Amino acid sequence: MSSRLNLPPLAERTFTSVIGRHVAMRPDQAAVRDPERSLSYGALYEEALAVAGGFGRLGVREGEAVLVMLDNHLDSVVAWWALALTRRVEVPVNTAYRGSILAHVANNSCARAIVIDEPYLPVLAEVIDQLPRVEHVIVRGAMALAMPPKVRVHGWEEIRGPRAAPVALEPWDLMGIMYTSGTTGPSKGVRVTQAHAYGYASPAVLGRAVPQDVSLVTLPLFHIGGQWAGVYNSLIAGGSSVVLPRFSATSYWDDVRRYGCTYTLMLGAMANFLYQQPAREDDRRHGLRQVLMVPVIAQMEAFCERFAIDSVATAYGLTEGSTALVAALGSARAGAVGVPRPDFDIRLVDEHDIEVPAGKVGELLIRPQEPWSVMDGYHKMPEATIAAWRNQWLHTGDAFRVDTDGQYVFVDRMKDAMRRRGENVSSFEVEKEIMEHPAVLEAAVIGVPSAASEDDILACVVLRPGAVPDADALLDFLEARLPYFMVPRYVDFLVELPKTPTAKVRKQELRARGVTPTSHDRPPKNGKRPAAGEKK
């Protein structure tokens, strides 16, 4: 990575600065489209300000939060723009949220209004009596449910106009509250400033995106991957985005061709699904040439050759702390996430925040060199904020090591790391190898108590449809690929893994379940894996 980033002055890293510049320069260029319609920069700007005028008439003031529970479509972008351009605070809501999780997000954010797609109204109705602050429900769709007398229901089309005026924003103004799924406690609302969102999404950080690019966005817009690394990245560059309802491995390359896409953010799991599809004679006939892949799959080179991808970039980012580690286009490789950004300070430390020796694993701590470049705290959770910023460094909770080429390698979530036979074991690395087995769809690895002290390893595995459970065959496969101390002792085949609404595995539920009478148990022989030809 360059010794400096080509970022504009801090004062210009705001939504109104970005959008205002492109509305003036390219008002008729396509900005965002979905399968139903397309809007230019100028048209999207005017439509968003008309919706912002509706928020004003409902009494939503500057600095107030608005819940946005919408699917992937152009109206979701319009709602985001309407709030961002007028110093209102967007609270994207995962459309899988319901019950106490939905109530917690609504109440913690103090929002008085929610914009919601009609299919999610029954979910809202289940908890509306638990949301004392909510006064306005803005429904995109025809259906409406009965709401308490204090709640007014409005149609999405009804609230538009007359046009509001955009607001000159400061880099420290709050742009959104992004809720991270709680795997061990309530979801925390990350307070995102204007400069924070810009720094995360900027093409100067993430790499390729120019005005001629058409970016394909299949990740949910309620996630930073969809909204920031997808749409906002393209907007900052003055490019165009295509927002699709969801990722589909079977229609992906047809969509790339249909919309003329040249660039995309692709999760590693998405790349694996695409790579596992049957080969087609038109696999290379499309315009997608650059990919931001997170994480990089082991078959990256074969993937690029098969699908005619010129180069791959990757990065490590978190909602709280921006994209702090980046591998530029052409330098990404499997197993690594890049090098530190020049405008961030990075440390790897032990449990006491003391730096670990070179080559050792430690928790990644980050600190920006410019203000307002990371979160300004967790919303209404001061104790969690203080804990995250212990000793004036933002603690990521992720374990890394530095490889011989200077790239950082993700090892595990700190709380998921295990110790076995005197060796540290990364659940991430074991899971990665399990996922290489052709019968495996998903896997989660946890440490369980061992009679010999430290941990034994339990692999919880979900098989692909039609695959036959065979724990010994899986363990044989792993013994050929892993050090003996990393091979699981126990294997459980599950129908599905317990997950949060944001699809993170709830490993605490697996730990609470532990080893069961149905768990396959194959103890290591003499504390090591059997030698070649030795009976297991």
Image (spheres, helix red, strand yellow):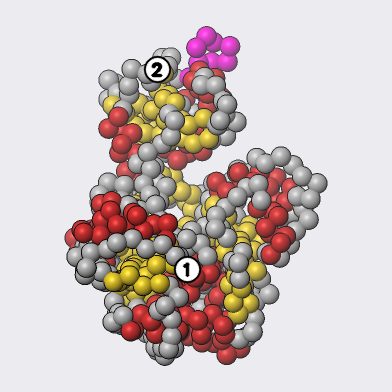
- Check if residue 534 falls in the magenta segment: yes
**Which is nearer the eye, 345 or 488?**
488
Location of the N terminus (image quadrant) = bottom right
Residue 216 appears at what percent x and percent y? 61, 62
Q: Is residue 333 left or right of residue 113?
A: right
- Check if residue 477 falls in the magenta segment: no
**Which is nearer the eye, 517 or 523?**
517
Kindly state the secondary structure of the residue where label 2 is placed: strand
Q: Is residue 70 positioned above or below 349 on the image?
A: below
Residue type at mark 2? Asp
Residue 514 appears at what percent x and percent y? 31, 28
**Which is nearer the eye, 131 or 237?**
131
Q: How crowded is mark 1: few (under 14 residues within 10 Å), some or many (20 or more)?
A: many
- The answer to the question of whether label 2 and label 1 lie on touching residues, with beta carbons closer than 8 A, is no
Q: Is residue 455 positioned above or below 381 on the image?
A: above
Q: Can residue 361 be seen in this view?
A: no
Which residue: 21% across, 70% down? 150
- Secondary structure that dominates the magenta span: loop
Residue 521 appears at what percent x and percent y? 40, 17
Circle on res. 186 = none
Q: Is residue 375 positioned above or below 94 on the image?
A: below
Q: Which residue lies furthest to the top in this view?
A: 535
Residue type at mark 1? Ser
Q: Name the residue under label 1.
A: 76
The residue range painted magenta reads 529-536
Which residue: 53% across, 35% down? 441
Q: Mark 2 points at which residue?
A: 521
Q: How crowded is mark 2: few (under 14 residues within 10 Å), some or many (20 or more)?
A: some
Which residue: 43% across, 85% down? 161
